[in-house]
Image (cartoon, grey):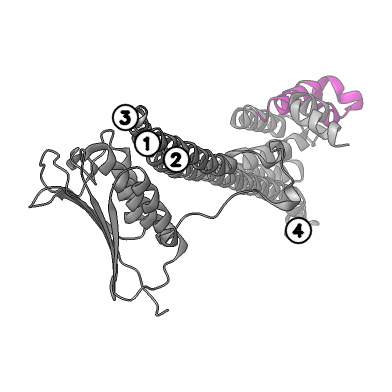
Amino acid sequence: MPGLYAWLRRNPRLVDGALALLLIYPGGSRLLITLPFTLGMVVPVVFRRKYPVAAFAAVIAVGALQVLLLRRPIGADLSVLVVLYTLAAYRPRRISLRGLAICLAGAAVATWRWHPVHPVDGLYTVGVETALFGGPVLLAWLLGDSARWRRGYYQALEEKAARLERERDAQALVAAAAERTRIAREIHDVVAHNVSVMVVQADGAAFALDGSPQRAREALGAISATGRRALAEMRSLLGVLRDPASRDVDLAAGPELGPQPGIDELGELLGQARAAGLPVSLTVSGVPRPVPEGEALAVYRVVQESLTNVRKHAGPGATAAVSLGYAGEGLVIRVTDDGRGPAVPDSTVPGGAGPGGAGSDGDGHGLTGMRERIELYGGSVRTGPRPGGGYQVVARLPLALEPA
């Protein structure tokens, strides 16, 4: 049944042609007289959907001639109701109301023409006959107008659904872009930090290879450990991107992902920096408070990126200092070094920090990620050279710190 209905919707001309055949009513001995009027009124029905106004005008014109020339109605007069319904269903109400008025006037004229008033009949009989002619006309218009309203309502629902779908797709694209940015930031932080440690250790191993084989062996061991740690962190990040159905893991046991680093892991991070040959100290002022996981990860990445840039740009013999200041209004992260990079003006944007030390990054991705992380939680980052030499990074997080 649904297939037949769909086929009929795809072939409306056939449906209207069948309807036109049903409207042809044999006229008996008057067939030759009524045939031109019958054809003139039923043929426009076949084209009523595509040309509703023209079909209505043609039927009304032939019907007017019929009222003037014939003495009684014919079966094809029902075409007036069909084209009036079509006019109300497919054209605005201001047009269909004019068609309704024309049909009601035509019904009154036909009643007067075919049933003239006699003293015996009286006005009552005339009124009844007029109602019999005008009632179907009014009903046909009401049905057509209702169909037009329903069609407009469903069309508005479809447009709204399509608009919501487009908005959903746009939001998905924005979310995907934000997620790609976050993942790129994470990968940059992991790779830049660990690779810089490995480079420093490799340089030290090459320097001590002949004079101090034990030192070279320790450096190679540190390179191996750092490489494994970098691979583990990369697997953690890439595991988030994989489709769980394609991963060769036990889904019931859950993904084998480690926790995100935070402030508690800063000691290990500084230990890696010291093992890479960068003397670094950690100072904590104020009363330590619990920090939310997202903000703690941002603190860790700021320190990690700053120490990475110290090793890359501060020069040989540089030292670094990391300080965390807990206060009532939030947390202040400060990373300084005494390197001798070129002095540049203070900056709060990625492009303003030069290659002088803690805040600098040749490609700009590190500073961009650092600023985005802190600003995500309503904080700010300021980088620039120190008055006495070296470089500094100062990040402020406006945390609502609760007592421990």
Q: Position of residue 86 (x, y in %)?
A: 67, 37
Answer with mark 1 or mark 2, whichever residue precedes in sequence.
Answer: 1
Q: Nearer the viewer, residue 393 or 224?
A: 224
Give the foreground label among 1 and 3.
Answer: 3
Can you tell which quarter of the image residue 356 is in?
Answer: top left
Name the residue located 23 percent from the left edge and 38 percent from the top edge.
313
Instruction: Specify start and end residues of the magenta stretch as a single range.
Output: 20-49
Label 3 crowd (10 A; few <14 / some 14-19 / many >=20): some
Structural distance between the alpha carbons of marks 1 and 4? 118 Å
Residue highlighted by disc 4: 122
Q: Position of residue 55 (x, y in %)?
A: 65, 28
- Furthest-left residue in this view: 387
Q: Tell me: residue 327, above or below residue 245.
A: below
Q: Nearer the viewer, residue 152 or 356?
A: 356
Residue 202 among magenta residues: no
Answer with mark 2 or mark 4, whichever residue precedes in sequence.
Answer: 4
Question: Residue 268 vs residue 17: left or right?
Answer: left
Q: Which kind of residue does numbered mark 4 sit on?
A: Gly
Answer with mark 1 or mark 3, whichever residue precedes in sequence.
Answer: 1
Label 1 crowd (10 A; few <14 / some 14-19 / many >=20): many
Residue highlighted by disc 2: 222
- Mark 1 and mark 2 residues within 8 Å of each other at the beta carbon: yes
Q: Position of residue 253 (x, y in %)?
A: 73, 52
Answer with mark 4 or mark 3, whichever residue precedes in sequence.
Answer: 4
Structural distance between the alpha carbons of marks 1 and 3? 10 Å
Residue highlighted by disc 3: 207
Q: Which kind of residue does numbered mark 3 sit on?
A: Phe
Q: Tell me: residue 373, above or below residue 187.
A: below
Residue 27 among magenta residues: yes
Name the residue located 51 percent from the left edge and 43 percent from the top edge.
233
Residue highlighted by disc 1: 201
